[in-house]
Image (spheres, coloured by chain):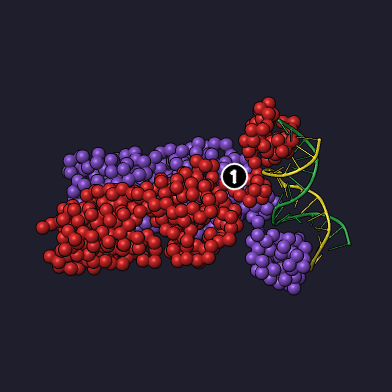
Chain colours: A purple, B red, C green, D yellow
Amino acid sequence: MATIKDVAATAGVSVGTVSKVLSGDPTVKPALQTRVRDAVTQLGYRPNLAARALRTNMVNVIGLVVPDISNPYFAQLAKAIETEAAVRDHMVMLANSHDDKPTEHRQIMALLDRTPRGIIVCAVSDEVSDRYVTDTAIVSVDRRLSDYSLISTDHAEGSAQIADHLFGLGHRRIAYIAGPQDTFVGRARLAGFQSRIDALRQRDPAVELTIHNGHFGYQSGEDIARTIFAAPAAQRVTAIAAANDQLAIGVLRCARDLQIEVPAQVSVTGFDDIDLASLVVPRLTSFQQPMDQLAKRSIAAIFDCKAGSADVLLQGTLMVRSSSGAAQI
Amino acid sequence: MATIKDVAATAGVSVGTVSKVLSGDPTVKPALQTRVRDAVTQLGYRPNLAARALRTNMVNVIGLVVPDISNPYFAQLAKAIETEAAVRDHMVMLANSHDDKPTEHRQIMALLDRTPRGIIVCAVSDEVSDRYVTDTAIVSVDRRLSDYSLISTDHAEGSAQIADHLFGLGHRRIAYIAGPQDTFVGRARLAGFQSRIDALRQRDPAVELTIHNGHFGYQSGEDIARTIFAAPAAQRVTAIAAANDQLAIGVLRCARDLQIEVPAQVSVTGFDDIDLASLVVPRLTSFQQPMDQLAKRSIAAIFDCKAGSADVLLQGTLMVRSSSGAAQI
DNA sequence: CTGAAAGCGCTTACAG
DNA sequence: CTGAAAGCGCTTACAG
């Protein structure tokens, strides 16, 4: 492989000059710039990134830690982040925490060793822990890591909009399947839903809300739905709001197994609007997270990292589809 | 950050000795080893990987290029590879080719610049192109890159098993929805299916096979199914074998929209056995790829890279579920 | 068995 | 505006 020395020799300049041309330093005379660029092309020179990293303590890499890349939500997020990083000429180093806090910590340490430009973490839980001693920018997306700044959708507002939607359709007996309460996301969505229902109770005191604790997975949704559907039809809830799409899809699956019509007998809503939400039958009403914005703002937060930058709260969009309909009187 | 020099000073040895201890050189006296390790712990020393990379031209990274990480199949593959890489203390650098050959090429070049231990490519297409000039090991998984060695499931055999399965259930009018024929996977699956059907025709000449060209996506399956289901019920195929699960799920979706019962009126099979296959309704009969094995063997191929190592063909498992049943007489 | 020293390929003050 | 030179933190022959 050609080195910067070879380029310098070919162009008849010093290595320092080559380096300056490569970094776009405008003080180099145009004539020399051309000679250097020609030599680069002629030799097929590619800078040694390890050498650059050793000098600058920085490498064009964004670290990304997610609980589980095979979860479609994280896969879509990872794709958006990779695409956005590519725009800035950075690659993404991916790590799974397997929903395990110690693993997450090890992965972050391993990433830090590689001196990336920054690390984006979708945290397992938001329990506060010591700050990492490093110059590397760390931000969290969707699920807060300790007290690092967070880029996220306004989960509470999204849940509130779903509550409004179901109330507006005439539903008065509503079940909410919550996500894990040791996660920011799980709590925020539940809180938003609950407080909006409380507010709506002013308009109609008949509103009843039952809350179930789930795990953000298909199976969890299916299991909980089975419990809910065990109630006699007359007393059963007419709407089930799930804390994410996978839970909701589990509910749909259970409803189908039990021959319960959606939305005729029960309305079902999700959250996140993963690709799959519009592919299931019936298509799932869900709250769409602005994935591209989450990715863009996370990457931006890393590049513009003034120490202790603020949280970013993004607004999503309620996607009304055929899984929710008017309550049966 | 503490450097190797600090460790050497603290332990009262030379940096060369520290380096040897860290790399597990057994010629260092146990007493010194202990002193060095104590110093490492005391200072919280983490080796500078960029410096190491500069010397060794190698970094503990595996590059992974997939067409689209938000495709559940690639997401599951990426997870398996990341997990397997972690076992060997390597991280994964992820890149999407967005199903575009020039982008794939750029991503591979960008990865090569980072001198990873090796690169695993799930290629956009297998058109032969020039070899990359590099010492970095390159292998392809599932979809061959040019003439690099390939780790894959025996797609032809899997398709043949599905053909047997449908034939055994009494199906004689069968449709096959093929994947793109400019991909190895698309061709191998179609060829396997077709040649087994041809063989079965010896046993019953009444077997009819119609072939449709699809794109490996949900929508493509739905669109093609709509065409297939447009035929009068009496002449319609009684079984549809799709080249992957997403196509098959699209078919299921269309069948439901048109109130066609699966498997009573038509049997449907997929290929890959992504997580979703067992979550749709009815659960999808599919051919399971041995993901963990694919990941293990890919990583192994990189580490054991004798120049020009052979292809690896792994056997999968037919998963019979409720989307396929006896043909209506 | 251990240490001194060269050198990997860059970037960046600094001198001119 | 350009070049000479130091130095980033390691690893690895080599000498002793």
* Residue type pointed to by label 1: Leu
Percent of width and height locating residue B291: 39, 48
Q: Is residue A185 visible?
A: yes
Q: Quadrant of residue A276?
A: bottom left
Residue lying at 77% horizontally and 66% vertically, measured from the top left: A13
B288 up-or-down from B208: above or below: above
In the rendered structure, the answer to whether residue B228 lies left or right of residue B98 reads: left
Residue lying at 35% horizontally and 53% vertically, measured from the top left: B154
Q: Which residue is most to the front? A: B202
Q: Which residue is most to the left? A: B329
Q: How many C-alpha atoms fall within 10 Å of the one at disc 1: few (<14), some, or many (≥20)?
A: many
Q: Nearer the viewer, residue B184 or B35?
A: B184
Q: Nearer the viewer, residue B313 or B189?
A: B313
In the rendered structure, the answer to whether residue B126 lies left or right of residue A30 reads: left
Q: Nearer the viewer, residue C14 or B48?
A: B48
Residue lying at 70% horizontally and 51% vertically, measured from the top left: A55
Q: Secondary structure at mark 1?
A: helix
In the rendered structure, the answer to whether residue B298 lies left or right of residue B207 reads: right
